[in-house]
Image (tube, helix red, strand yellow):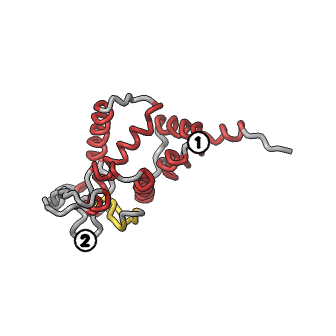
Amino acid sequence: MSDQPSRLGRLVAPAAVVSSAAVAVSAPPSSRLAAVLATRRRGDFIEIPGVGRVWLELATAGDYLEIQSATRRAMAAAAIPDELAYLQAWELERAVLTLERTIREPEEGRHATRVGSRDEWAALDIDTLNAAWNLYGDVRERLDPMSIELAPEDQLAIELAIKKKDGALLRSFGATRLSAWLATSGGLLSSSQTPSS
């Protein structure tokens, strides 16, 4: 661990000394899947407004499970129920935890160094956090090896965001999920809008 503040720590709390987490380098691949994972591109460089150029390392399935579990614990500790009315609070916590794990220093050899801690990401203004979360979704969609079917909970959440006219939440779904929703629910739009003569 370093005694130097993280880049994000200097942005949100310049006087604080924050240690950065390091991820261990894995051993040479020992199976076919390990060899595929070792050579597959799992991230990309992005520019986050106010933060700068970073390496975005996509979350693994293990990361996702840990993020979901940590989100549930955080929401329980804050007494925020798992209900549609509180969807934005849950999504915000997932975004903070995902960005904390996946946004890394861009220099070669430093991709294991996280840009900031969970508390530093949570201290950012909501617009910067939303921009970073939307960029994460864009990279995820761009590197997705195949299109996936829209999950029922995503379909319901998108419809709720449309009813609330919540543009920020709609952007967080990304173009792929919104396109999938439109392709499967497009009839709802055509039946509710009649052209004027």
Task: Residue lying at the far front in this picture: please name it.
Answer: 15
Query: Element at badge 2?
Result: loop
Counting other residues with Cα less than 10 Å from the Cα at mark 1, is it few (<14), some (14-19), or many (20 or more)?
Answer: few
Relative to 144, is 108 above or below?
A: below
Q: Quadrant of the C terminus?
A: top right
Marks 2 and 1 sit apart, C-alpha to C-alpha, by 42 Å
Q: Amino acid at mark 1?
A: Lys
Query: Element at badge 1?
Result: loop
Q: Place residue 114 in its image quadrant.
A: bottom left
Q: Is residue 183 visible?
A: yes
**Which of pointers 2 and 1 indicates the residue nearer the eye?**
1
Question: Contact (CB < 8 A) between labels 2 and 1?
Answer: no
Closer-to-camera residue (22/39): 22
Task: Residue lying at the far bottom in this picture: please name it.
Answer: 108
Residue at the image position 42 percent from the left and 50 percent from the top:
126
Q: Position of residue 12 (x, y in %)?
A: 31, 57
Q: Position of residue 152 (x, y in %)?
A: 48, 35
Which disc, if any, is residue 108?
2
Q: Place residue 110 in its image quadrant.
A: bottom left
Residue at the image position 19 percent from the left and 58 percent from the top:
17
Closer-to-camera residue (96/174): 96
Residue at the image position 35 percent from the left and 42 percent from the top:
93
**Mark 2 or mark 1: whose residue is earlier in sequence:** 2
Closer-to-camera residue (24/30): 24
Q: Is residue 81 left or right of residue 101?
A: right
Q: Where is mark 1, residue-wise?
A: 165
Q: Amino acid at mark 2?
A: Glu
Q: Place residue 94 in its image quadrant.
A: top left
Q: Position of residue 115 (x, y in %)?
A: 27, 60
Residue at the image position 46 percent from the left and 31 percent from the top:
84
